[in-house]
Image: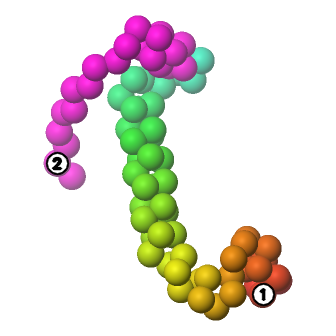
Amino acid sequence: MKSSTLTIRLGRDLERELDRACERTGRTRSDLARDALRRQLAVLRFERLRRKVLPLAEARGYLADEDVFRDVS
């Protein structure tokens, strides 16, 4: 897999928080940044899919999580 470099600017507070997290976890800045980016991209994918299916679900009477749980339980 080809890799690339991403440069980002961090404010002082975020940089300190990142460095403390690195010390606590024993992970590198790059590891934590990659993990955070993966998680954020997953959230964005989920939100996009949810917006896409929400009208279909609502048309079938699924208005809340409880409606889904009721039918799959």
The three-letter amino acid code for the residue at tag 1 is Asp
At label 2, the amino acid type is Lys
Q: Secondary structure at mark 2?
A: loop
35 and 1: which one is in front? 35
Disc 2: CA contacts within 10 A as few (<14), some (14-19) or many (>=20): few
Eyeballing the image, is 59 above or below 44? below
Label disc, if present, on residue 6 of the rendered structure: none
Camera-side residue: 4 or 69?
69
Q: Considering only order in the chain, which callout, 1 or 2, is on the residue closer to the N terminus?
A: 2
Q: Which quadrant of the figure has residue 33?
A: top left
Which image quarter: residue 4?
Answer: top left
Question: How far is mark 2 from mark 1, CA to CA?
Answer: 44 Å
Q: Quadrant of the C terminus?
A: bottom right
| x and y, in percent, of residue 47 in the image | 48, 61
Choose mark 2 or mark 1, whichever is in front. 1
Q: Position of residue 50 (x, y in %)?
A: 51, 69
53 up-or-down from 25: above or below: below
Task: State the residue position of label 2.
Answer: 2
Q: Residue at x 45, y 31 (%)?
A: 32
Name the residue located 42 percent from the left edge and 65 percent from the top edge.
Answer: 48
**Residue 23 in view (yes/no):** no
**In magenta stretch: residue 22:** yes
Looking at the picture, how far across and down is residue 35, in whole percent?
A: 44, 40
- How many residues crowd mark 1 within 10 Å: few (<14), some (14–19), many (20+)? few
* Magenta residues, start to end: 1-23
